[in-house]
Amino acid sequence: MASAPSQPARGAVRQILREGQPDTVAVEEPLEIRVDDSAVAVTMRTPGNDEELALGFLYGEGLIAEPRPVGLTEDFAANTVVVGGPLLRQLDNRRFYTTSSCGVCGKGAIEEIENHSGVIAPGWRGVALHRATLAGLPDRLLQPGFARTGGLHATGLFNASLELLCVREDVGRHNAMDKVIGWALQEGLVPFADAVLCVSGRLSFELVQKAAVAGASVLVGVGAPTSLAVELAHSRGLTLCGFARGDRVNVYTGEERLNHG
């Protein structure tokens, strides 16, 4: 089973000159996701693991439910990946666009998002979930790109034994999660069962949406959640934890999964 890389993904960082001195910055470039011959989405992302990104994005939007063939276009067009169709639902000629700072723009009501995810099964069948243990998960994320640039977000996937399975980095926090979910989809691990996702930043609605659709039981973040993130996590039965630092973490929903020991 694959694991997180010890070096930034190829193409993820670039050398520049800053005030005449060499510096390293995170790369941000567009990626077009096609399904068969149709362009479905354009996202601003950090190159690397683009196939995973495409699969994770389409899964999170309820457009696919299983791994699909994915790769470069026949003409090897730059910054373009093609996923095998068909999609599970028609898009009415819509084309998604995401920036590196936010996910899909123009989302419908929260009820529409809930259509793509069931309520997560209650309980927890893994190792005991103590607050201090969850608070320490961000320190276990391998972030070589962030270490070199300070400009990349990370998402990590932990199993029920809290073993780290995969870490991905990207300039967009939602892209980092899509890459992890796409990796897990190819590994046959989606939908998740008693899994924890951990992110290096704040907890937005779109991250909760993606975690819930993938079936994660717990989502932990270094930063704060938004009101809509808390609302959606509560409705989906997801344990949502923010401000994970040191041995402390705030639990906003799903506290029943924690073992206070």
Image (cartoon, rainbow, N blue to C red):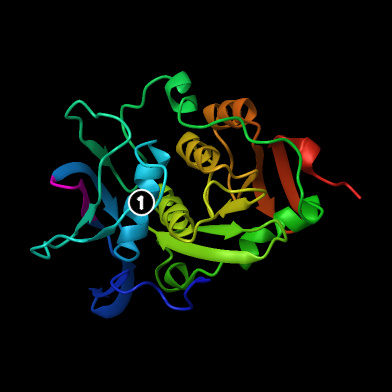
Residue drawn at (33%, 34%), measured in percent from left and top? 88
Q: Is residue 35 above or below residue 228?
A: below
Q: Is residue 135 left or right of residue 60?
A: right
Residue drawn at (27%, 51%), measured in percent from left and top? 44
| Residue farthest to the left, as pictured | 75
The percent coordinates of residue 4 (x first, y second) are: 50, 71
Residue drawn at (64%, 36%), measured in percent from left and top? 238
**Crowd tier of the residue under label 1, counting other residues whose Cα lies within 10 Å: few below 14, some 14–19, many 20 or above:** many
Q: Is residue 251 above or below residue 158?
A: above
Residue drawn at (64%, 51%), measured in percent from left and top? 195
**Is the stretch drawn in magenta largely helix, strand or loop?**
strand
The percent coordinates of residue 219 (x first, y second) are: 61, 45
Amino acid type of disc 1? Leu
The percent coordinates of residue 180 (x first, y second) are: 47, 57
Can residue 33 be found in the magenta stretch? yes
Viewer can see residue 152: no
Q: Is residue 43 above or below residue 104?
A: below
Return the residue nearer the eye: 153 or 49. Answer: 49
Q: Which residues are magenta?
A: 30-37
Q: Is residue 238 left or right of residue 187?
A: right
Residue named by callout 1? 55
Q: Quadrant of residue 74?
A: bottom left
Can residue 123 be found in the magenta stretch? no
Return the residue nearer the eye: 137 or 15. Answer: 137
The percent coordinates of residue 187 (x first, y second) are: 48, 61
